Amino acid sequence: MEVREIIARRAAKELNDGEVANLGFGMPTQAVNYLPKGIKLIMHTENGAFGFGGKPNCNDADSDVSNAGSEPVTLLPGAACMSLATSLGAMRNGYIDVTILGALEVDQFGNIANWAVKRDGLWWPGIGGAMELTYGTKKIIATLQHTDKNGNSKIKKKCELPLTGKRCVKTIITEKAVFDVGEDMLILREIYPGLSLEDIKAITEADFIVGEDLKDMEL
């Protein structure tokens, strides 16, 4: 299974019946395609809609109906579309129960960095609505690959990139593991099948303890 699909499938399992949920740009937008059976949510996209569904087939796609990543989605009965300003206001004011965000880095304190990276000595910003979401959402789930292309951990003791939100992340999901954020350290909940605890320690910079109910990652 491809890395992005592993993360999106696992992230979808964090969503609960009846929640208002936002899916951020990148891997998080794919989670709507893997919702557990019977789960009914009000899905929100920051570009201005409540009540969207999964990806339509090619013949039913409408270029005017897309998510935050400009990917085609369906609008379910009762869906509401609005201006970007209204949508951002809903995000800041606590109308969203849970948000799944992509991240460049996260750390053991629940900090998240996902809007700016340095390349060849220059900052490349990608400012979106994540700052509103980390401020106004009750539960933040961060999704990212466990290491960068050089094998360095993206699960840090302390974020090195400019922060998007402070002490806001509750759960971290990678293709290798699932962590909860505890009191200044992480709690390992799940490991991808076939990997050992030593494998996770070798690729994780952050301090973490092993949860009492540690198990294989469910996909």
Image: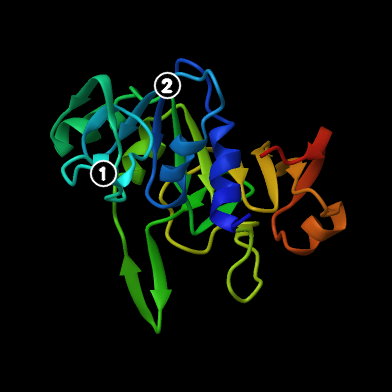
Q: In terms of secondary structure, where does tag 1 sit? A: helix
Visible in this render: residue 184?
no
- Say which of 71 and 19 sits in front: 71
Task: Say which residue appears at 45% left-offset and 44% top-offset.
Answer: 30
The alpha-carbon separation of the residues under discs 1 and 2 comes to 25 Å
Using the rendered view, name the quadrant where residue 83 is placed. top left
Question: What residue sits 37% from the left and 57% below the top?
Answer: 115
Taking the image as drawn, is residue 173 in sight? yes
> On screen, 75 above or below 60?
above
Coordinates of residue 167 in the picture (x, y in percent): 52, 41
Identify the amino acid type marked 1: Asn
> Residue at 30% across / 48% down in the picture?
71
Q: Position of residue 66 (x, y in %)?
A: 25, 43
Q: Residue at label 1?
A: 59
Q: Which residue is mark 2?
A: 41
Q: Earlier in the sequence, mark 1 or mark 2?
A: 2
Label 2, secondary structure: give it: loop
Question: Residue drawn 51% across and 20% down?
Answer: 39
**Split into 4 quadrants, where in the image is the N terminus?**
bottom right
Q: Is residue 26 left or right of residue 66?
A: right
Determine whether 216 is above or below 196 in the image: above
Q: Quadrant of residue 93?
A: top left
Q: Is residue 77 above or below residue 138?
A: above
Between 188 and 159, the one lying in front of the other is: 188
